[in-house]
Image (cartoon, grey):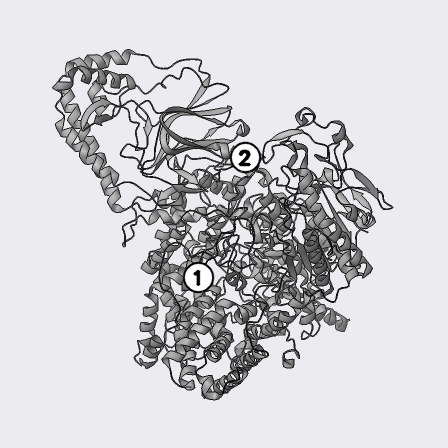
Amino acid sequence: MGNRKHIIHNPMSRREMLGLCKSGFGSMAFMGMFGSLSSCSTQIDDPKSIITQMGQVPHYVPKVKNIIFLYMDGGISQVDSFDPKPRLDKENGEDPKKKFKVDNTQFDNVGKILKSPWDFKQYGECGMPVSELFPHIGSCADDLALIRSMVSDFPEHTNANYFLHTGSGIQGRPSMGSWVTYGLGSENSNLPGYVVLDGGLIPPGGLDNFKSGFLPASYQASILKSGPVPLANIQPQETIEGLQNKKLDFIKQMDDTMIGKLQNADAVESAISNYELAYQMQSSVPELTEFSSESAATKKLYGMDSDDPHTRSYGAQCLLARRLVERGVRFIELTCPKVKADRWDQHAGLKDGHERNAHAVDQPIAGLIKDMKARGLLEETLIVFTGEFGRTPFAQGSDGRDHNPSAFSMWMAGAGIKGGTIFGKTDDYGYRVIENETTIHDLHATMLHLLGMDHERLRFRFGGRDIRLTDVHGHVVRDVLA
Amino acid sequence: MTFRGKNIYTTIGAICFVACSLFQCGNQENTTKLPKHVDFNFDVRPILVQNCYLCHGPDPSSRKADLRLDTFEGATALRDEGKRAIVPGSPNKSELVWRISHTDPEIMMPPPESNLKLSNYDVAVLKKWIDQGAEWKPHWAFIPPTIKEPEQFDTEDAANEIDNYLLEKMELKGLKPAPLASKHTLIRRVAYILTGLPPTPEEITAFSKDDSPEAYEKMVDQYLNTSAFGERWARHWMDIVRYAETKGHEFDYTIMGAWRYRDYLIRAFNQDVSYPQLVKEHLAGDLMDSTRWNPDNNTNESQIGTLFYALSEGTHSPVDVRKDEADRIDNIIDVTSKTFQGLTVSCARCHDHKFDPIPTADYYSMYGLIESSRFSPVPANFTKDKAKSHEEILQLKKDVRSIIANALEQDDSELKKMGQKSMNQADGADDLNFDYLGDFRGNDLDGWKSDGMAFGQYSTLGDPEFSNDKMVHFASGKASSRMFSTGIYGALRSPNFTIDKDFIGVYARGNKATIRIIVDNFQLIQNPIYGGLDKKVNSETWKQVIFNIADWKGHKAYIEFFPGTYQRHVYNLPKEAFIEAEYAIAFDEDWPENIPIKASKTHENPSLIANWLERKDSPQEVALLNDFIQTNKKALKIHEAEKQQQHIEELSASLRDSVFFIGINDGFGINSHVFNRGNHADLSEEEVPRHFLSAWSDTVSAFNSSGSGRMEFADEVLNPNNPLTDRVMVNRIWHYVFGKGIVPTVDNFGLQGKLPSHPELLDYLAIQFQKDGGSIKTMIKMMVMSKAFQREVAGGAEAEIADPQNILLTHFPLRRLEAEAIRDGLLASAGNLNQEMYGPPVPVHLTDFMQGRGRPGTSGPLDGNGRRSIYQEVRRNFLEPMMLTFDRPIPFSTFGNRNVTNVPAQSLILMNDPFVLHQAEVLAKASIIHEKSNEERIKYIYIKTLSREPLEEELQSAKAYIKILAQSYGLNEAEGTDSLEVWKDYCHSVYNLKEFIYLI
């Protein structure tokens, strides 16, 4: 068994890398392409010098090494969570069309103005108001930079999901996680650089939210599930101890002989080295989901002792996210757990649905922030909490809310973030942004900025265009940065 | 001082080398020797494109200092300061030279903030070019190909002209080609590249035994003529047209009959249908004068080509339907222009193309083509026989009318009087509080388009109606889908109109029929939002069918009627379905009380009967005819007509349709406005007439078609003077044969694309392709017959240094097999390949990691029923992991050049995926059954998987390994020999050899 561990070949040979650079392949793809910066450096004389000469990445000194993206699928309601609107209480039950211009909505079933069923309380030194839905997250208020002025281009889930994840409402563009790993690579060659923790609900639009589009397939997300086989094909099929090792030895021996007869076979060399990586992933991936080394207190912090099975499962996902960060995984997205309500998408039954969803995620997320902070991991990790759009301040039917792309709230916490900030403003109803409108492109630009990348320079040539995650838009939201 | 200068020079040189190699500026290939004659296209333009055109290129919106360097006029124009950027012949007088040589950041170009920097080499090239007169040429790809004869080489090295062109370049670099590869390498290479499958042991034996000089050609021909050839090459084309069988987005709806397009491609490649024919069928297969029929079952092939338009993704409830339309059309423009012209026209959506001479007008001209086209079900079983029956029926119907007319004419005088009376009646009414959208009570379909056979070209006005084989009546006017019979496909579609009223009403009756309002060409009609735009008609009595369309005021729309219904966006047509309509109107508030028959044209003939016979009659005239036959019933001698009518009814039943695919057909010509900055809500004043791309011609003329103009577009693509069509296609073929295009950016021949490594060869191939009538097989064969194709993979040490990327093709490029070839190779070598061709896709095998909305209720089989990868379902939201991991592109745009990645996930599949292990087991079983000794079994497995016999040392290693495996299971040697487990592990190991997935 031991002989498999001795080497990690550089997954890309020096010549191959230079060849790629020469051929003008993207501009910085080479690091992520076959694994990671760190493993490249095992054989490249001095990869950093090449990077510097390229004038590419990182564009600036990065504040953040990893991102945990907490996706609140379905569209969390801003006026019920982070953007209190007393006027809704006053005008509850009145006709919104008499108060302001109402845009077309997805379901075109505009009801009366609907006050929030929840009270708000001020938290932390900053006094950030957070609704009763999120008492635990509220307790982290001083770590959060809240943006209340988010807007999206799409009022419909699928387009809005693609937009949030890829910067384009159309299917097929690379996901933000793909861009990040394309730009920076992963720091761990035994694990994929971009991981989606499937909490039970893959958002509308499906796995294409996490694909690499025109970027090489190596940048697509790996879907990790809880359970004994967290990653596809990670489990050896050999039933006899040590047998796989013998196979791999034989394969390597034959491959090496074959390659000796070829010149210029760098690609084949890389393919051979990938077996080493694959082999190591087989043990490092299951080890990830093995929580026995975590203390009871830690698990409790994440809500893993909760009566609510969804809190427990989301808690486990959050804990897993922390473990991935510890192992250098670059971009981690968590999808929502399958509570009884349909994600955060409460077209009806707002109270019950939002409460179920909030209960599942509130304590685990707060636990994640606190645990990461205690371990010093928050100093190099960005946590992002957002839905794809917001909800209407008026009812859909009697007790739901429809989609609202014209205003929603999201927050970030962690490295490079000015905690306790509130940025942007909506009107008295929380229906439209009136100050510091912030787009999805701005969010992406800000995330890339924190990772040390200039969103205008992170490009990939496809179909004759140098395409960016932020298309031709995006500004870094400097007001929320430390 | 000198020393210092030199030092700086070398430092700059070094930096420039890195920068240039990274950005591929120029085809400078790190040599410092300047070309003898500096060529604008191959030496100069790349430098300008990379460094200057962002601010001094074709796009006026980003142009700085009002200077453009993309045209001779612009570059040599007299500027305010009395200077010229370029003075041909005088580098020293050229402002450009002064600026690019300057170091003052205020003066130098490109400016420091651009992060662009010219190398000394670039500067020298520009100077020399200006010195030589600064000759300007159009972009190389826009100049028609010409033949430049290559030097002729010895036939030992050169099998055909391809080799001569290649050897010429090698010689310039002082390189020699590699020797020819061994026979087993060759047959494996040819088999995989032509068919995507490994050669069978029998084929290998036959080829290795054949010592005749024609052996190689015979072998090549054999693979060119297997049906597997079409399966391989169809899949290549499917990458280009973003082939998928579902629409993705939220629910991943089926693209109706997409697989028929896949089968169409397989047949076309196997039959070597000419490229021009294929192009025409893709772009305008619905508009062709002569249909191409499938020789196997006589169905219409041509129209299946148009399915390629429908392979885009689609969403069901866009809140902004106009934006949705813009995005869908953008995808079609993108794919169409890349596929057939190698141009990225969709870059001109928001502004003139930054680099290519593609103005936004060209984009919106293409936009108009698609906007004027309409998606529609197309009967898949429309045969030549049906077409014949249809014509026969039309003739019979004419005959019936003639017989009746003859009978009527016997009492001519009275009818004449009646006719004159009728003509005095005035039609029309004033002050209508509604708009007519279509009135079918007259003798025609009021300008609506009748697609398919069901509605014919006229209303029913005056049609003789029969009951119990007796003619009883002349019909009143209506549009009817049962002109012949129920259950026949047809759709009646209105001209485009702008919605300006609250309601649309249709007076209709029918059974299992549908009326839809198509707003901005939006097809995926359903709740929420759009559900009300699709109404079923299920009433034998006349009904007012009302649509509330107030939400879409200001949008363009058309109405369509058809028998049958859409269920989950798949069209169904039951036998009994039909629809009839008298008129369609738009109104506010209530259905109007009085809807007079719209004034029809004045009658051309003085004779009422002649009017009737020629279908130029009016409703009043038909009423008179009815009065007449009512009173003269007995006198009419129309037995013959009644007999014919029976025949018509018998024939009509054969016209029924039951299976469909989604295609496109012509609507009414729409000229699009330009969307300012790409914003669909911000339109330019003027409309762009539909025309062809203007990149290489000085003048473009507007298309005349009253329909979409797609046929005229196709004609321009196929115009022999089009400099791109043939080049782009032969380059694609070259790419698939040699693994890399002569132009490496196979989908982009524009200024941002890479330059051809062998422009003369490319031109030769393009011209040859045209001479051969666009025969794809002939072109492939010529390439495969070249010596270049037959060379060893290993290049010499010299070539390695002088040409590390093997651009000169001194040796055959090493390549990994594609996802499909790996999977199919596993199945074939295991003897588990199911060779069944065609048909609906095998449902995708769903793993636990494939979740999300629209997930099919049941998973497909793990081994895909053993069928080739091309027959496995391509569900956009549930793409096969193995295909994705081995780089099959995500189907959203043209991908003529797949990525080739190298990642651990690939190893994990081959190591642990149950599919791979299953194939190993099947192969193990076969080897145990077929062979007795370990040695024979090892040889058997080698031939099956690696297409060769093992070398002696490999045989020994394998034997030793078998022993080790046996020991692992606690078996002795003899037991090991017959253990399925042991052989399965061995086969599994062989499948994991790199040689299995590389063409070596």
The answer to whether residue B163 of the structure is visible from this angle is yes
Q: Chain of mark 2?
A: B
- Residue A42 x, y percent position in the rendering: 69, 74
Q: Quadrant of the N terminus of chain B?
A: bottom right
Between A464 and A371, the residue placed more toward the observer is A371
Between B675 and A65, the residue placed more toward the observer is A65
Q: Amino acid at mark 2?
A: Ile
Between B26 and B784, the residue placed more toward the observer is B784
- Circle 2 packing at 10 Å, graded few (<14), some (14-19), many (20+), is some
Left or right of B280? Residue A112 is right
Residues tagged by mark 1 and mark 2 found on one chain of the structure:
yes
From this view, report whether residue B152 is shown above or below residue A349: below
Q: Which mark is residue B864?
A: 1
- Residue B171 x, y percent position in the rendering: 47, 75
- Residue B344 x, y percent position in the rendering: 52, 51
In the image, what residue occupies the spot 24% across and 11% down? B421
- Residue A411 x, y percent position in the rendering: 75, 47
Residue pointed to by mark 2 = B529
From this view, report whether residue B581 is shown above or below residue B944: above
Q: Amino acid at mark 1?
A: Gly
* Image-quadrant location for residue B94: bottom right
Are circles 1 and 2 on residues that touch, CB within 8 Å?
A: no
From this view, report whether residue B33 is shown above or below residue A416: below
Q: How many marks?
A: 2
Q: Chain of mark 1?
A: B
- Circle 1 packing at 10 Å, graded few (<14), some (14-19), many (20+), is many
State the CA–CA distance, disc 1 to disc 2: 38 Å
* Image-quadrant location for residue B529: top right
Q: Secondary structure at mark 2?
A: loop
Q: Earlier in the sequence, mark 1 or mark 2?
A: 2
